[in-house]
C-alpha cells in the first residue's frame, strides 16, 4: 500500500448479470455526474460517473456491461472481462469491483462471483432489490454467504437509495486496505471446470439461501398470458402498435414548437446579418440543416421511453422468448433476437453482438439481415415524409393513419429480415437451428428516475450527434450547393450550376425510373455517412436553391415539390437501402474482409431499387403520380 494509491481517486467498477439493477445502482450513486462515451476501438457504450466518499476521497465509478461470466462471447462481455482483468487499452484497472446481484436470484450471479474471486481484485457483493427478497420471505444467511465467497456483502435497494452509504464505505475501505494488490489466477475454464463451478454455486445457494416463504406468484400468472403462443404475440403486436401511434400523436405539439423556434431563429439571424454568403451559410446551411433533424428529437425520445420502460419492467426478454419460434422458422438462431432487437436502436451494436452466436453461418446470416431492422436514424426520414404526405386522419375513429404507416414501415423491415434470412438458409447454408435458452427476470415497476436519466442520456447523444456529424456535413453540403457561381447570362437556378447540382443531374437518370429527382439524389450522398443526414441535406439543398415558398418547414415544401408516388418510393428506398457507411465498416471488421460488406451493399441496394421501382409505378398507376 502506498500513500499515492490512497490519495488518488478510487476506481470502482460495477459488474453483474443483466437485469440485476446495476445501472439503477450506478445512477443512484453518481446522479447527474456521469458521462457516456464509447470504449476505444469499439461501439460499446462506456458509462462513468463520480462520487465523493464519506472519507472525503473521490471515486470514479464505471458501469460495466452486464455479463453472466468472464468467458466473453459478445463485445459487451469482452469489455467487461478486459476491464475486470485490467487489460483495457488506455484504461486504469479498477481498485475495487462491486458485484451487483438480484437478491431474489443468486444462483446465476454466484458463478460470476466465483470467477471474480479468481481475479484476485478486492470486491464487494451488493445484494440489490433486497426489499423484494424480504417481501417474498426469502432468507439469506449473509454471514455464511460472505464467508463462502470471501468478500463483504451489503444489501441495497438502488431505487430507494438504501444501503448506498454502507456500500461506498466498504468499497472505500477495501481500496485502502488492498491498494496495489492483485493476483489474477483466472483463465478460460475447461468444460469440466464450468460444470464444477455450477455445482459449487448450487452448493452455496443451498447452504446459504432458504426458499421464499411467499414466492412470487404474480410473475407466473402474468407470464401465463404474456408468454402464451397466441395471446402473447397479439399483446406484443399491440404494444408495438401503441408505441408507434404515440410517436406521432404525443410528439406533434413539441415538434411544432421546435420547428417554430428554428424558424424564428433563422428569421432573426437573417434580419441581423447582411445579405450574402455568410448569412446563407448560417441560415440555409446550419440552421436549415441541423434544425430539420433536431425537430424529430421528441419522437426519438418517445420511442426510447417505451423501450426503456419495457426493458426495466422485464418484458423485453419475454418478447425475445415469444419471437424465438418465429425466428427459428425463418432460419435465424434464437440468439439472433438480441442483436436484431439492438438494431432497432442502431445496427452497429446489433452486428457487434452477433458474437454470442457460435455457428459461423448463423452469425453471418444475422449480420446480413441486421441492417434491415428499422434503426432510430431512419425515424427523421420516415416522420418527415409521413408528416408531409400522409393526412392526419383517424382510422376506425381512434387510430392515427400516420402511426399506422410508421408501424407498417417497421413491420416491413422485420418481415424482409425474416424473408432474407429464410432464403439464405435454404439456398446457401442448410442445417438445423439450435434452440435458445434465456433467463427470465421477475417483473418490476420501472423506476421513474432511472428511466428519465437514461432518456436524457439518449437525447443528449442524439443532440451531440447532430453537432458532431450533421453540422460539418451541412457546411460541406452548403459549399457544394453554393459553388461555383452560375456563369454570366445563366438563366436557370444558381444551384443547377453548383457542384451539388452537377452531381445530382449526372446521377439523376439512374434514379429517375424510381421517381427520384436530382435533389433527392444529392441528399443520398451525405446521407451515406448517417441516414438522418439526408433530411438535413434536403433542407440545405432546397434552402440554397431558393425553394422557400413554405418558409423553413421542409415537410410542407416537399409536399409542394414531390408527388405522393415519389414520397412513397423514397420511404421504400429507406426500408432496404444500406445508407450507413459505419455499418458496412463494422461488418468488414467483424467478418475480416470486404466480401460480406460488399454482398450486403449489393443485395440491399438491389432490394431498395426494386422496392422503390415497384412502389413508384404502382402508385403512379393508381393516380398518385
Image: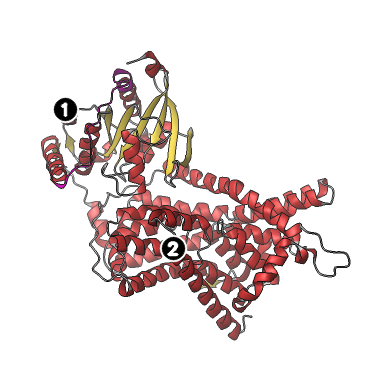
Highlighted magenta segment, given as a residue range: 174-191
Is 176 within the magenta? yes
Q: Position of residue 566 (x, y in %)?
A: 62, 74
User: 285 or 443: nearer the eye?
Assistant: 285
Spatial CA distance of label 1 from label 2 is 48 Å
Image coordinates for residue 229, horizontal then vertical, percent: 27, 67
The percent position of residue 268, horizontal first and vertical second, equals 78, 48
Give the quadrant of residue 249.
bottom right
- Name the residue carrying label 1: 147
Which residue is rendered at x = 53% and y = 67% of the image?
Answer: 574
Q: Which residue is mark 2?
A: 373
Taking the view exactly as shown, the residue that stands out farthest to the right is 489
Q: Residue furthest bottom?
A: 621
On the question of residue 247 being in view, the answer is: yes
- Report crowding for label 1: few under 14, some 14 to 19, many 20 or more residues within 10 A (C-alpha): few
Depth check, front residue: 75 or 10? 75
Residue at point 56%, 53% (across, down): 298
Foreground pick, 158 / 606: 606
Residue under the image location 33 percent in, 22 percent down: 175
Query: At numbered mark 2, what does the secondary structure look like: helix, strand or loop?
Result: loop
Q: Is residue 464 left or right of residue 445?
A: right
On screen, 484 above or below 166?
A: below
In the figure, 30 relative to 355: above or below? above
Residue 587 percent across, percent down from the top left: 43, 57
In the rendered image, the quadrant that contains the N terminus is top left
Q: Main secondary structure of the magenta part?
A: loop
Amino acid at each position: 500500500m502506498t500513500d499515492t494509491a490512497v490519495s488518488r481517486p478510487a476506481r470502482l467498477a460495477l459488474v453483474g448479470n443483466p437485469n440485476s439493477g446495476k445501472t439503477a445502482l450506478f445512477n443512484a450513486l453518481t446522479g447527474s455526474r456521469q458521462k457516456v462515451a464509447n470504449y476505444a476501438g469499439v461501439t460499446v457504450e462506456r458509462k462513468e460517473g463520480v462520487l465523493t466518499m464519506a472519507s472525503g476521497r473521490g471515486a470514479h465509478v464505471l458501469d460495466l456491461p452486464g455479463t453472466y461470466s468472464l468467458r466473453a462471447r459478445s463485445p459487451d462481455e469482452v469489455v467487461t472481462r478486459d476491464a475486470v482483468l485490467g487489460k483495457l487499452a488506455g484504461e486504469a484497472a479498477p481498485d475495487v469491483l462491486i458485484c451487483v446481484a438480484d437478491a431474489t436470484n443468486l444462483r446465476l450471479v454466484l458463478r460470476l462471483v466465483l470467477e471474480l474471486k479468481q481475479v484476485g481484485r478486492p470486491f464487494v457483493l451488493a445484494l440489490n432489490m433486497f426489499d423484494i427478497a424480504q417481501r417474498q420471505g426469502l432468507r439469506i444467511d449473509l454471514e455464511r454467504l460472505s464467508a463462502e465467497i470471501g468478500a463483504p456483502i451489503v444489501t441495497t435497494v438502488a431505487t430507494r437509495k438504501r444501503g448506498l452509504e454502507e456500500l461506498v464505505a466498504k468499497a472505500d475501505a477495501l481500496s485502502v486496505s488492498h491498494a496495489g494488490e492483485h493476483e489474477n489466477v483466472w483463465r478460460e475454464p475447461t468444460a469440466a471446470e464450468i460444470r464444477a463451478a455450477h455445482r459449487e454455486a448450487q452448493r452455496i445457494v443451498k447452504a446459504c439461501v432458504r426458499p421464499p416463504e411467499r414466492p412470487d406468484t404474480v410473475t407466473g400468472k402474468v407470464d401465463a398470458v404474456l408468454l402464451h403462443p397466441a395471446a402473447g404475440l397479439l399483446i406484443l403486436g399491440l404494444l408495438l402498435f401503441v408505441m408507434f401511434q404515440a410517436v406521432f400523436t404525443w410528439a406533434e405539439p413539441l415538434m411544432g414548437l421546435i420547428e417554430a423556434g428554428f424558424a424564428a431563429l433563422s428569421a432573426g439571424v437573417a434580419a441581423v446579418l447582411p445579405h450574402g454568403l455568410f448569412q446563407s451559410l448560417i441560415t440555409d446551411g446550419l440552421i436549415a440543416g441541423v434544425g430539420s433533424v433536431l425537430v424529430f428529437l421528441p419522437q426519438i425520445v418517445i420511442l426510447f421511453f417505451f423501450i426503456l420502460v419495457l426493458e426495466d419492467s422485464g418484458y423485453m426478454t419475454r418478447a425475445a422468448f415469444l419471437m424465438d419460434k418465429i425466428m427459428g422458422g425463418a432460419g435465424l438462431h434464437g440468439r439472433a433476437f438480441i442483436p436484431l432487437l439492438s438494431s432497432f436502436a442502431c445496427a452497429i451494436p446489433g452486428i457487434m453482438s452477433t458474437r454470442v452466436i457460435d455457428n459461423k453461418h448463423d452469425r453471418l446470416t444475422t449480420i446480413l439481415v441486421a441492417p434491415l431492422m428499422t434503426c432510430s436514424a431512419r425515424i427523421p426520414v420516415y416522420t418527415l415524409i409521413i408528416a408531409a404526405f400522409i393526412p392526419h386522419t383517424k382510422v376506425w375513429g381512434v387510430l392515427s393513419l400516420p402511426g399506422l404507416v410508421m408501424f407498417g414501415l417497421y413491420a416491413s423491415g422485420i418481415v424482409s429480415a425474416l424473408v432474407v434470412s429464410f432464403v439464405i438458409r435454404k439456398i446457401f447454408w442448410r442445417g438445423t437451428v439450435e434452440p435458445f435458452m434465456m433467463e427470465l427476470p421477475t417483473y418490476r415497476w420501472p423506476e421513474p428516475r432511472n428511466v428519465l436519466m437514461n432518456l436524457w442520456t439518449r437525447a443528449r447523444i442524439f443532440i451531440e450527434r447532430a453537432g458532431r456529424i450533421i453540422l460539418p456535413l451541412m457546411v460541406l453540403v452548403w459549399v457544394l450547393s453554393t459553388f461555383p457561381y452560375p456563369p454570366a447570362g445563366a438563366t436557370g437556378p444558381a444551384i443547377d450550376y453548383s457542384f451539388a447540382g452537377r452531381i445530382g443531374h449526372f446521377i439523376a437518370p439512374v434514379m429517375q425510373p424510381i421517381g427520384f429527382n436530382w435533389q433527392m439524389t444529392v441528399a443520398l450522398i451525405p446521407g451515406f455517412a448517417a441516414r438522418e443526414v439526408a433530411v438535413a441535406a434536403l433542407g440545405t439543398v432546397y434552402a440554397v436553391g431558393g425553394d422557400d415558398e413554405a418558409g423553413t418547414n421542409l415537410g410542407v415544401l416537399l409536399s409542394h415539390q414531390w408527388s405522393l408516388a415519389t414520397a412513397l418510393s423514397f420511404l421504400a428506398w429507406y426500408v432496404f437501402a444500406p445508407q450507413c457507411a459505419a455499418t458496412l465498416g463494422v461488418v468488414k471488421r467483424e467478418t475480416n474482409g470486404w466480401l460480406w460488406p460488399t454482398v450486403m451493399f449489393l443485395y440491399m441496394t438491389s432490394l431498395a431499387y426494386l422496392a422503390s421501382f415497384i412502389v413508384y409505378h404502382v402508385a403512379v398507376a393508381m393516380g398518385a403520380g
